[in-house]
Image (spheres, rainbow, N blue to C red):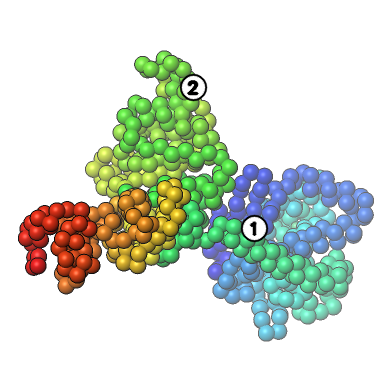
């Protein structure tokens, strides 16, 4: 990292009641109040002691900034780390600052550096309250530069203000050198830093910063544990591809941006949307889902935005829409690719303005809702064809989460299967519901075009049909069961016929070839069994 590559916008976070600089809390302070404070301080404890207090304040500030910069970035060099103080000075509004290092020897800890400031807040603060100065007065800045560079060098470095804008110089110039380079010249300035005391404080502060970092790491780990990484609605995610999706979803949850979830039908897009909501600051607010393809356009509009009584036939009373009902929560718009161009335009306006206008109403209402949408269609393609507004697409897709189909995350099939079987055990009161080893193989090899939903349905089908709680391949729905490869036959897409053939063969094997017994077991007459055996292609009995 180089100092000139620091990006102010990336470093500072704003949220209600909080301004942060990468995890450290900042305070925006009024300059006039600071000026008053300086005057009171000088009047109360004298100029000399006031100067000490302000210098020390700056010193600790500089140390904290230097420690923060060390924690955040890998600096290309010690010089870059030191030069970053100028960027921080700009971020925090202290001054326009530049740094010029003329000597830097890491081995001996020797440094000579000149910092200059222009448009300095400290100069303005002084002059607002105390007028023109007769000597340099940027005590906080002197302390700051000393604290920052001392921390970087691991050695006392003192700055002295040579010229000050408060005393009508064209800019403030600060000359900094390590304690050895200064020699005895610095002795008269040292008391302002209370050097002996500050050395101890440096160590103490470094220790506190380290402790704080440890606490932060612990807190982060605790947060992760409470979230149970890699678990989605109680099911452990084993596949790498879906773990990555879950990871992205959890990271994006913290930000209030729109999210577009894409994926084939049945991949669990709504489950993921609920997960994002549950991991977000809105988790205590409502989560409302609407399937945009399920309602005709005019009803969908009133469902989303509400309507006034009498605005259309059947609108007997005022009705609040889902956007308002989801206030402080999340609205999930499924099948977003299916909404009409008119509704697309209205939705775009709502997302841009954060306001809704109920059908038949002239007034708008403010809303505070996070929008997550989903589709199984190719919105880029629809946008190219002009069927979906590009501007709306970009608004909805600030973050894109693409859910892989189940066949691309086969490691998740068995955990999902066990989860569903547990559900059906309770729902259908089948205490010993379980899988035969052969069925697990079939389930993990099948392609699941209908994804998780198809798996769930197939298992419920089998759970209801199984005789003694044992789910075997032959009672799976025929699409799934038909995919069982026969011995010696590479038939991946089996038919009902092939399934029937296998079943008849299996029963005949069990009865030792006794056709009468096999027919009884199959619940058909012996003549029907003969006919089946004759009609089935490839059958040689
Ligand atoms: Zn100055």
* Quadrant in which the N terminus appears: bottom right
* Quadrant in which the C terminus appears: bottom left
- At horizontal 40% and vertical 43% (from top left) the residue drawn is 373
Nearer the observer, 122 or 3:
3
Nearer the observer, 211 or 62:
211
Query: In this rendering, does residue 190 appear at all?
Result: no
Residue 426's label in the rendered image is none
Q: Is mark 2 within 8 Å of ligand 1?
A: no
Q: Which residue is mark 2?
A: 363
- Looking at marks 1 and 2 on the same chain, the residue that comes earlier in the sequence is marked by 1
Q: Quadrant of ligand 1?
A: bottom right
Nearer the observer, 206 or 39:
206
- At horizontal 34% and vertical 55% (from top left) the residue drawn is 467
Quick check: 348 above or below 106?
above
Quick check: 38 above or below 59?
above
Q: CA distance from mark 1 to mark 2?
A: 41 Å
Residue 23's label in the rendered image is 1
Query: In this rendering, does residue 154 appear at all?
Result: yes
Secondary structure of the residue carrying numbered label 1: loop
Q: x and y percent of residue 161 in the render? A: 77, 64
Quick check: 105 above or below 316?
below
């Amino acid at each position: 990292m180089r100092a000139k590559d620091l990006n102010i916008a990336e470093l500072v976070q704003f949220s209600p009641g909080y301004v942060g600089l990468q995890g450290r809390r900042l305070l925006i302070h009024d300059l006039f109040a600071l000026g008053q404070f300086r005057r009171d301080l000088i009047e109360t404890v004298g100029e000399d002691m006031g100067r000490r207090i302000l210098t020390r304040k700056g010193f600790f500030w500089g140390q904290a900034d230097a420690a923060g910069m060390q924690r955040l970035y890998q600096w290309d060099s010690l010089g870059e780390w030191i030069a970053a103080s100028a960027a921080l000075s700009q971020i925090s509004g202290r001054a326009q600052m530049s740094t010029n290092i003329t000597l830097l020897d890491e081995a001996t800890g020797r440094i000579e550096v000149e910092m200059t400031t222009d448009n300095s807040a400290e100069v303005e603060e002084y002059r607002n309250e105390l007028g023109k100065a007769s000597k340099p007065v940027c005590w906080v800045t002197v302390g700051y530069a000393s604290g920052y560079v001392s921390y970087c060098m691991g050695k006392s470095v003192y700055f002295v203000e040579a010229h000050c804008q408060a005393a009508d110089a064209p800019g403030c110039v600060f000359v900094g050198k390590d304690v050895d380079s200064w020699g005895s010249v610095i002795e008269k300035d040292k008391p302002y830093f209370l050097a002996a005391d500050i050395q101890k404080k440096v160590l103490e502060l470094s220790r506190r910063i380290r402790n704080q970092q440890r606490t932060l790491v612990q807190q982060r780990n605790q947060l992760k544990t409470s979230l149970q990484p890699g678990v989605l609605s109680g099911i452990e995610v084993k596949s790498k591809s879906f773990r990555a999706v879950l990871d992205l979803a959890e990271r994006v949850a913290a930000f209030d941006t729109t999210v577009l979830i894409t994926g084939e039908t049945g991949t669990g897009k709504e489950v993921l949307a609920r997960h994002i909501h549950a991991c977000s600051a809105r988790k205590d607010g409502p989560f409302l889902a609407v399937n945009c393809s399920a309602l005709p356009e005019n009803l969908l509009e009133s469902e989303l935005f509400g309507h006034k009584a009498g605005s259309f036939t059947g609108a007997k009373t005022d009705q609040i829409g889902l956007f308002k009902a989801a206030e402080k929560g999340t609205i999930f718009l499924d099948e977003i690719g299916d909404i009409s161009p008119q509704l697309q335009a209205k939705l775009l306006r709502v997302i841009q303005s954060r306001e809704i206008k109920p059908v038949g109403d002239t007034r708008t209402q403010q809303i505070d809702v996070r929008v997550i949408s989903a589709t199984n269609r190719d919105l880029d393609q629809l946008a190219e064809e002009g069927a979906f507004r590009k501007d709306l697409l970009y608004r909805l897709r600030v973050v894109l989460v693409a859910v892989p189909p189940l066949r691309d995350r086969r490691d998740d099939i068995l955990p999902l299967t066990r989860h569903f079987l547990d559900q059906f055990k309770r729902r259908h009161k089948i205490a010993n519901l379980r899988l035969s080893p052969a069925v697990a193989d079939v389930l993990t090899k099948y392609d699941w075009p209908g994804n998780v939903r198809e798996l769930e349905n197939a298992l419920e089908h089998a759970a209801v049909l199984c005789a003694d709680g044992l789910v075997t391949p032959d009672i799976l729905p025929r699409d799934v069961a038909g995919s069982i490869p026969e011995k010696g036959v590479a038939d991946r897409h089996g038919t009902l016929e092939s399934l029937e053939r296998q079943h008849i063969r299996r029963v005949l094997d069990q009865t030792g070839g006794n056709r009468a017994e096999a027919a009884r077991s199959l619940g058909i007459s012996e003549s029907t069994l003969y006919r089946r055996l004759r009609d089935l292609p490839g059958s040689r009995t």
